[in-house]
Image (spheres, grey):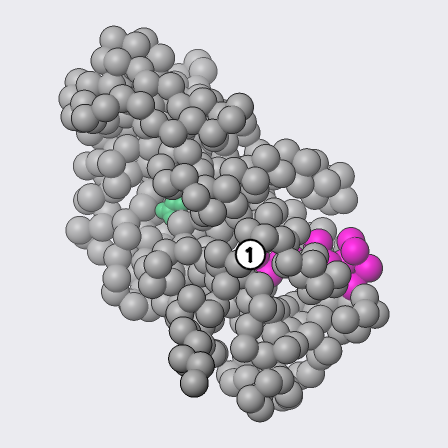
Amino acid sequence: MNASDDIIIIGGGLIGLSLAVELKLRGAHVTVLSRNFQEAAGHVAAGMLAPQAEVIPPGPMLELGLRSRALYREWISKLEEITGLDTGYWHCGILAPVYEIPDHTELYQPPNSPAIWLDQQAIHKHQPGLGVEVVGGWWFPQDAQVDNRRYLVKALQTASQQLGVQILEGVEVEAIARNSKTIEALQTNQGAITGSHYILTAGAWSGQLLPQVPVYPRKGQMLSLKVPESFESLPLKQVLFGTEIYIVPRRDGLIVIGATLEDVGFSVGLTPDGVQTLLAGAIRIYPVLRDFPIQEFWWGFRPTTPDLLPILGTSPFDNLTLAVGHYRNGILLAPITAKLIAESVLDQKSDPLLEYFAWERFSPAPLQR
Ligand code: GLY
Protein backbone atom coordinates (compact mmCIF):
# COMPACT_ATOMS: atom_id res chain seq x y z
CA MET A 1 0.00 0.00 0.00
CA ASN A 2 0.99 3.67 -0.33
CA ALA A 3 1.87 5.70 2.73
CA SER A 4 -0.83 8.18 1.67
CA ASP A 5 -3.57 5.57 2.08
CA ASP A 6 -5.67 5.67 5.23
CA ILE A 7 -4.86 3.07 7.84
CA ILE A 8 -7.51 2.38 10.46
CA ILE A 9 -6.31 0.84 13.72
CA ILE A 10 -9.09 -0.98 15.58
CA GLY A 11 -8.18 -0.62 19.25
CA GLY A 12 -6.57 2.30 21.09
CA GLY A 13 -4.60 0.36 23.68
CA LEU A 14 -0.86 0.18 24.06
CA ILE A 15 -0.31 -1.94 20.94
CA GLY A 16 -2.64 0.18 18.80
CA LEU A 17 -1.02 3.44 19.90
CA SER A 18 2.53 2.08 19.53
CA LEU A 19 1.66 1.13 15.98
CA ALA A 20 -0.01 4.47 15.29
CA VAL A 21 3.15 6.33 16.35
CA GLU A 22 5.41 4.05 14.29
CA LEU A 23 3.25 4.27 11.16
CA LYS A 24 2.89 8.03 11.47
CA LEU A 25 6.66 8.47 11.87
CA ARG A 26 6.99 6.51 8.61
CA GLY A 27 4.61 8.91 6.84
CA ALA A 28 1.29 7.06 6.98
CA HIS A 29 -2.16 8.56 7.55
CA VAL A 30 -3.49 6.85 10.64
CA THR A 31 -6.80 6.79 12.50
CA VAL A 32 -7.22 4.94 15.80
CA LEU A 33 -10.66 3.76 16.89
CA SER A 34 -10.81 3.42 20.66
CA ARG A 35 -13.90 2.14 22.46
CA ASN A 36 -12.66 3.06 25.93
CA PHE A 37 -9.04 3.99 26.45
CA GLN A 38 -9.26 3.11 30.17
CA GLU A 39 -10.17 -0.53 29.47
CA ALA A 40 -6.99 -1.36 27.57
CA ALA A 41 -4.68 -3.99 29.02
CA GLY A 42 -1.81 -1.47 28.94
CA HIS A 43 -3.44 0.25 31.93
CA VAL A 44 -3.50 -2.94 33.91
CA ALA A 45 -0.06 -4.54 33.70
CA ALA A 46 2.89 -3.82 35.99
CA GLY A 47 5.19 -2.90 33.10
CA MET A 48 7.82 -5.60 33.56
CA LEU A 49 10.14 -6.05 30.59
CA ALA A 50 10.86 -9.61 31.55
CA PRO A 51 11.55 -12.09 28.75
CA GLN A 52 14.04 -13.82 31.03
CA ALA A 53 12.16 -13.67 34.34
CA GLU A 54 9.05 -15.00 32.61
CA VAL A 55 11.28 -17.99 31.68
CA ILE A 56 10.07 -18.06 28.10
CA PRO A 57 11.73 -21.16 26.60
CA PRO A 58 14.37 -20.64 23.89
CA GLY A 59 12.60 -20.23 20.53
CA PRO A 60 10.76 -17.61 18.48
CA MET A 61 8.82 -16.14 21.42
CA LEU A 62 11.95 -15.59 23.48
CA GLU A 63 13.67 -14.11 20.43
CA LEU A 64 10.73 -11.74 19.93
CA GLY A 65 10.87 -10.72 23.59
CA LEU A 66 14.63 -10.22 23.63
CA ARG A 67 14.53 -8.19 20.42
CA SER A 68 11.82 -6.01 21.88
CA ARG A 69 13.64 -5.52 25.17
CA ALA A 70 16.72 -4.50 23.18
CA LEU A 71 14.67 -1.85 21.34
CA TYR A 72 13.17 -0.42 24.50
CA ARG A 73 15.65 2.26 25.53
CA GLU A 74 15.73 3.86 22.10
CA TRP A 75 11.97 3.54 21.68
CA ILE A 76 11.38 5.23 25.03
CA SER A 77 13.89 8.00 24.23
CA LYS A 78 12.04 8.70 21.00
CA LEU A 79 8.70 8.93 22.81
CA GLU A 80 10.16 11.11 25.55
CA GLU A 81 11.74 13.38 22.92
CA ILE A 82 8.46 13.77 21.00
CA THR A 83 6.33 14.42 24.07
CA GLY A 84 8.66 15.77 26.75
CA LEU A 85 7.02 13.22 29.07
CA ASP A 86 8.72 10.69 31.33
CA THR A 87 7.76 7.03 30.82
CA GLY A 88 9.25 5.59 34.00
CA TYR A 89 11.64 3.29 32.10
CA TRP A 90 14.05 1.77 34.61
CA HIS A 91 16.76 -0.75 33.81
CA CYS A 92 16.47 -2.15 37.32
CA GLY A 93 16.95 -5.90 36.76
CA ILE A 94 14.61 -8.61 38.04
CA LEU A 95 15.27 -10.94 40.97
CA ALA A 96 13.33 -14.23 40.97
CA PRO A 97 13.48 -15.84 44.44
CA VAL A 98 12.43 -19.48 44.88
CA TYR A 99 11.21 -21.55 47.84
CA GLU A 100 12.65 -24.84 46.55
CA ILE A 101 16.02 -25.41 44.94
CA PRO A 102 15.37 -26.36 41.30
CA ASP A 103 16.76 -29.66 39.98
CA HIS A 104 19.54 -27.84 38.23
CA THR A 105 20.66 -24.29 38.64
CA GLU A 106 21.46 -23.61 35.03
CA LEU A 107 19.23 -21.63 32.78
CA TYR A 108 19.49 -20.71 29.11
CA GLN A 109 21.66 -17.62 28.85
CA PRO A 110 21.05 -15.62 25.69
CA PRO A 111 24.15 -13.83 24.36
CA ASN A 112 24.94 -10.71 26.44
CA SER A 113 22.05 -11.48 28.75
CA PRO A 114 23.10 -13.53 31.75
CA ALA A 115 20.86 -15.42 34.15
CA ILE A 116 22.77 -15.66 37.42
CA TRP A 117 21.92 -18.22 40.08
CA LEU A 118 22.20 -16.89 43.65
CA ASP A 119 22.30 -19.36 46.53
CA GLN A 120 20.53 -18.71 49.83
CA GLN A 121 23.25 -16.59 51.34
CA ALA A 122 23.88 -14.66 48.15
CA ILE A 123 20.22 -13.83 47.47
CA HIS A 124 19.57 -12.54 51.00
CA LYS A 125 22.68 -10.39 50.69
CA HIS A 126 21.59 -9.18 47.24
CA GLN A 127 18.14 -8.20 48.56
CA PRO A 128 17.84 -7.75 52.32
CA GLY A 129 14.38 -8.36 53.80
CA LEU A 130 13.35 -11.37 51.69
CA GLY A 131 11.17 -13.98 53.40
CA VAL A 132 12.92 -16.66 55.45
CA GLU A 133 11.55 -19.38 53.14
CA VAL A 134 13.56 -18.03 50.18
CA VAL A 135 16.35 -20.55 49.49
CA GLY A 136 17.90 -19.04 46.37
CA GLY A 137 16.91 -17.47 43.09
CA TRP A 138 17.79 -16.05 39.72
CA TRP A 139 19.10 -12.60 38.98
CA PHE A 140 18.28 -11.25 35.52
CA PRO A 141 20.25 -8.01 35.23
CA GLN A 142 19.02 -7.18 31.72
CA ASP A 143 15.31 -7.31 32.49
CA ALA A 144 13.74 -3.95 33.23
CA GLN A 145 10.46 -2.10 33.74
CA VAL A 146 8.45 0.83 32.49
CA ASP A 147 5.62 2.67 34.26
CA ASN A 148 2.91 1.68 31.81
CA ARG A 149 -0.10 2.67 33.86
CA ARG A 150 0.81 6.18 34.95
CA TYR A 151 3.18 7.26 32.19
CA LEU A 152 3.73 5.10 29.10
CA VAL A 153 0.11 5.02 27.92
CA LYS A 154 -0.08 8.79 28.39
CA ALA A 155 3.16 9.31 26.48
CA LEU A 156 1.91 7.15 23.60
CA GLN A 157 -1.40 8.96 23.48
CA THR A 158 0.32 12.36 23.55
CA ALA A 159 2.87 11.33 20.90
CA SER A 160 0.06 10.08 18.65
CA GLN A 161 -1.82 13.36 19.02
CA GLN A 162 1.27 15.51 18.52
CA LEU A 163 2.24 13.60 15.39
CA GLY A 164 -1.24 14.04 13.92
CA VAL A 165 -2.78 10.62 14.40
CA GLN A 166 -6.56 10.93 14.47
CA ILE A 167 -7.78 9.24 17.67
CA LEU A 168 -11.53 8.64 17.80
CA GLU A 169 -12.37 7.87 21.42
CA GLY A 170 -15.74 6.32 22.21
CA VAL A 171 -15.99 4.62 18.81
CA GLU A 172 -16.89 0.98 19.21
CA VAL A 173 -16.51 -1.37 16.28
CA GLU A 174 -19.62 -3.54 16.43
CA ALA A 175 -19.02 -5.66 13.33
CA ILE A 176 -16.59 -6.00 10.47
CA ALA A 177 -18.30 -6.11 7.07
CA ARG A 178 -16.30 -8.36 4.77
CA ASN A 179 -16.40 -10.59 1.76
CA SER A 180 -14.25 -13.69 1.45
CA LYS A 181 -11.04 -11.71 0.68
CA THR A 182 -11.52 -8.12 1.81
CA ILE A 183 -12.70 -5.98 4.69
CA GLU A 184 -15.31 -3.63 3.22
CA ALA A 185 -16.19 -1.42 6.19
CA LEU A 186 -16.34 -1.24 9.95
CA GLN A 187 -19.79 -0.94 11.45
CA THR A 188 -19.43 1.23 14.54
CA ASN A 189 -21.70 2.88 17.10
CA GLN A 190 -21.00 6.10 15.14
CA GLY A 191 -21.83 4.69 11.70
CA ALA A 192 -19.74 2.98 9.00
CA ILE A 193 -16.03 3.76 8.78
CA THR A 194 -13.82 2.75 5.85
CA GLY A 195 -10.11 2.89 5.15
CA SER A 196 -7.59 1.46 2.72
CA HIS A 197 -6.07 -0.88 5.26
CA TYR A 198 -7.10 -2.05 8.73
CA ILE A 199 -5.05 -3.30 11.68
CA LEU A 200 -6.74 -5.24 14.46
CA THR A 201 -5.32 -4.42 17.91
CA ALA A 202 -8.45 -4.86 20.00
CA GLY A 203 -6.81 -6.86 22.78
CA ALA A 204 -8.96 -9.39 24.65
CA TRP A 205 -12.01 -8.29 22.60
CA SER A 206 -10.43 -9.15 19.22
CA GLY A 207 -11.99 -12.63 19.10
CA GLN A 208 -15.46 -11.11 19.31
CA LEU A 209 -14.87 -9.25 16.04
CA LEU A 210 -13.38 -12.01 13.89
CA PRO A 211 -13.92 -15.74 14.41
CA GLN A 212 -10.61 -16.50 12.65
CA VAL A 213 -8.77 -14.79 15.54
CA PRO A 214 -9.03 -16.94 18.68
CA VAL A 215 -8.33 -14.37 21.38
CA TYR A 216 -10.09 -14.46 24.73
CA PRO A 217 -9.65 -12.76 28.11
CA ARG A 218 -7.63 -13.95 31.05
CA LYS A 219 -8.27 -11.74 34.03
CA GLY A 220 -5.61 -10.25 36.29
CA GLN A 221 -6.24 -8.52 39.62
CA MET A 222 -3.59 -6.14 40.93
CA LEU A 223 -2.91 -3.67 43.73
CA SER A 224 -0.40 -1.06 44.79
CA LEU A 225 1.27 -0.03 48.04
CA LYS A 226 3.46 2.92 48.95
CA VAL A 227 6.77 2.94 50.80
CA PRO A 228 6.05 4.72 54.12
CA GLU A 229 7.52 8.19 54.67
CA SER A 230 9.63 6.81 57.54
CA PHE A 231 11.93 5.04 55.03
CA GLU A 232 14.90 7.21 54.12
CA SER A 233 15.51 5.38 50.85
CA LEU A 234 13.73 2.85 48.68
CA PRO A 235 13.91 -0.61 50.27
CA LEU A 236 13.44 -2.28 46.86
CA LYS A 237 15.38 -1.19 43.80
CA GLN A 238 14.64 -4.17 41.58
CA VAL A 239 11.59 -6.19 40.63
CA LEU A 240 10.85 -9.33 42.67
CA PHE A 241 9.34 -12.06 40.51
CA GLY A 242 8.09 -14.96 42.62
CA THR A 243 5.81 -17.91 42.12
CA GLU A 244 2.52 -16.45 40.88
CA ILE A 245 3.42 -13.04 42.33
CA TYR A 246 5.49 -10.07 41.29
CA ILE A 247 6.42 -6.91 43.12
CA VAL A 248 7.44 -3.94 41.00
CA PRO A 249 8.89 -0.93 42.83
CA ARG A 250 8.69 2.46 41.10
CA ARG A 251 11.32 5.09 41.69
CA ASP A 252 8.90 7.38 43.55
CA GLY A 253 8.02 4.76 46.19
CA LEU A 254 4.91 3.24 44.61
CA ILE A 255 4.97 -0.58 44.64
CA VAL A 256 2.82 -2.48 42.14
CA ILE A 257 1.83 -6.05 42.96
CA GLY A 258 0.33 -8.54 40.52
CA ALA A 259 -1.34 -10.51 39.30
CA THR A 260 -3.95 -13.23 39.36
CA LEU A 261 -4.44 -15.39 36.26
CA GLU A 262 -8.14 -16.22 35.97
CA ASP A 263 -10.23 -17.84 33.26
CA VAL A 264 -13.48 -16.12 34.15
CA GLY A 265 -14.36 -14.50 30.84
CA PHE A 266 -15.10 -10.79 31.05
CA SER A 267 -16.30 -10.95 34.65
CA VAL A 268 -15.36 -7.60 36.14
CA GLY A 269 -14.23 -6.66 39.63
CA LEU A 270 -12.05 -7.74 42.49
CA THR A 271 -12.59 -10.88 44.55
CA PRO A 272 -11.60 -11.67 48.14
CA ASP A 273 -9.70 -14.71 46.92
CA GLY A 274 -7.81 -12.70 44.30
CA VAL A 275 -6.81 -9.94 46.70
CA GLN A 276 -5.91 -12.39 49.47
CA THR A 277 -3.74 -14.43 47.09
CA LEU A 278 -1.84 -11.31 46.05
CA LEU A 279 -1.32 -10.02 49.58
CA ALA A 280 -0.29 -13.40 50.98
CA GLY A 281 2.12 -14.03 48.08
CA ALA A 282 3.68 -10.60 48.38
CA ILE A 283 4.13 -10.77 52.17
CA ARG A 284 5.60 -14.27 51.94
CA ILE A 285 8.32 -13.19 49.54
CA TYR A 286 8.98 -9.74 51.04
CA PRO A 287 7.48 -9.58 54.57
CA VAL A 288 8.29 -5.93 55.19
CA LEU A 289 5.37 -5.06 52.89
CA ARG A 290 2.84 -6.13 55.53
CA ASP A 291 2.81 -2.65 57.06
CA PHE A 292 2.94 -0.57 53.89
CA PRO A 293 -0.15 1.55 53.15
CA ILE A 294 -2.37 0.21 50.37
CA GLN A 295 -2.98 2.69 47.56
CA GLU A 296 -5.25 1.10 45.00
CA PHE A 297 -6.74 -2.13 43.58
CA TRP A 298 -7.64 -2.79 39.95
CA TRP A 299 -8.13 -5.53 37.38
CA GLY A 300 -8.09 -6.10 33.66
CA PHE A 301 -8.08 -8.65 30.87
CA ARG A 302 -5.01 -10.07 29.16
CA PRO A 303 -5.55 -10.96 25.49
CA THR A 304 -4.89 -14.69 25.40
CA THR A 305 -4.61 -17.22 22.55
CA PRO A 306 -4.82 -21.04 22.72
CA ASP A 307 -1.00 -21.39 22.61
CA LEU A 308 -0.39 -18.20 24.65
CA LEU A 309 1.57 -16.65 21.74
CA PRO A 310 0.58 -13.50 19.87
CA ILE A 311 -0.99 -13.46 16.42
CA LEU A 312 1.01 -11.09 14.23
CA GLY A 313 1.01 -10.21 10.55
CA THR A 314 -1.29 -11.01 7.68
CA SER A 315 -4.88 -12.20 8.04
CA PRO A 316 -7.41 -14.05 5.88
CA PHE A 317 -8.24 -10.64 4.37
CA ASP A 318 -5.93 -8.75 1.99
CA ASN A 319 -6.45 -5.40 3.69
CA LEU A 320 -6.34 -6.49 7.34
CA THR A 321 -3.24 -7.02 9.48
CA LEU A 322 -3.29 -8.60 12.94
CA ALA A 323 -1.44 -7.56 16.10
CA VAL A 324 -3.31 -9.32 18.89
CA GLY A 325 -2.95 -11.90 21.67
CA HIS A 326 0.11 -10.54 23.48
CA TYR A 327 -1.09 -12.22 26.71
CA ARG A 328 1.43 -11.51 29.55
CA ASN A 329 3.87 -9.63 27.35
CA GLY A 330 2.08 -6.71 25.71
CA ILE A 331 4.18 -3.98 27.32
CA LEU A 332 7.40 -5.84 26.52
CA LEU A 333 6.39 -6.57 22.93
CA ALA A 334 5.07 -3.12 21.99
CA PRO A 335 8.24 -1.82 20.24
CA ILE A 336 8.94 -4.96 18.20
CA THR A 337 5.25 -5.34 17.29
CA ALA A 338 5.14 -1.73 16.10
CA LYS A 339 8.32 -2.17 14.04
CA LEU A 340 7.51 -5.51 12.41
CA ILE A 341 3.88 -4.69 11.70
CA ALA A 342 4.71 -1.23 10.30
CA GLU A 343 7.28 -2.83 7.97
CA SER A 344 4.77 -5.46 6.94
CA VAL A 345 1.96 -2.96 6.25
CA LEU A 346 3.96 -0.18 4.58
CA ASP A 347 6.83 -2.05 2.91
CA GLN A 348 5.33 -5.54 2.49
CA LYS A 349 8.43 -6.72 4.35
CA SER A 350 7.88 -9.83 6.41
CA ASP A 351 10.46 -10.44 9.12
CA PRO A 352 11.20 -14.20 9.23
CA LEU A 353 10.11 -14.25 12.88
CA LEU A 354 6.53 -13.34 11.92
CA GLU A 355 5.93 -16.74 10.36
CA TYR A 356 5.85 -18.32 13.86
CA PHE A 357 3.05 -15.99 14.92
CA ALA A 358 0.83 -16.36 11.86
CA TRP A 359 -2.95 -16.71 12.26
CA GLU A 360 -2.87 -19.84 10.06
CA ARG A 361 -1.55 -21.94 12.95
CA PHE A 362 -5.12 -21.97 14.27
CA SER A 363 -6.59 -22.66 10.87
CA PRO A 364 -4.91 -25.60 9.14
CA ALA A 365 -5.25 -25.39 5.38
CA PRO A 366 -7.49 -28.09 3.90
CA LEU A 367 -5.59 -31.04 2.43
CA GLN A 368 -4.74 -30.58 -1.26
CA ARG A 369 -6.43 -33.12 -3.53
N1 GLY B 1 3.16 -9.63 32.64
C1 GLY B 1 2.66 -10.21 33.80
C2 GLY B 1 1.21 -10.45 33.82
O1 GLY B 1 0.56 -10.48 32.80
O2 GLY B 1 0.68 -10.62 34.89
Question: Residue 160's image quarter?
Answer: bottom right
Identify the residue at image location x=35%, y=59%.
Answer: 307
> Mark 1 highlights which residue?
354
Instruction: Identify which residue is drawn at 66% across, 83% down.
Output: 193
Q: In the rendered view, would you say 215 is above or below 228?
A: below
User: Tag 1: residue type?
Assistant: Leu
Q: Could you say which quadrant of the image residue 6 lies in?
A: bottom right
**Residue 279 image offset from top left, x and y in percent:** 23, 38
Q: What element carries label 1?
A: helix
Q: Where is residue 76 in the image (x, y as percent from the top left)?
A: 65, 39
Q: In which quarter of the image is the N terminus?
A: bottom right
Residue 208 position in % (x across, y down): 42, 77
Relative placement, left or right, of 59 versus 247 is: right
Question: In the depicted view, which residue is nearer to us: 32 or 223?
Answer: 32
Q: In this view, does 47 lie to the left or right of 160?
A: left
Q: Decide if residue 131 is in sight here.
A: no
- Which residue is the extreme one toward the front? 369
Q: Judge by depth and name the residue closer to the eye, 341 or 167.
A: 341
258 with respect to 20 (left or right): left
Most frequent secondary structure within the magenta stretch: helix
Q: Write down the region rendered in magenta.
A: 14-28
Q: Which residue: 55% across, 72% down?
A: 315
Check the image and report above or below for 248 versus 198.
Answer: above
Residue 199 makes an appearance in the image = yes
Quadrant location of the C terminus in the rendered image: bottom left
Compared to residue 292, the image places residue 259 above or below, namely: below
Asked whether 17 falls inside the magenta stretch, the response is yes
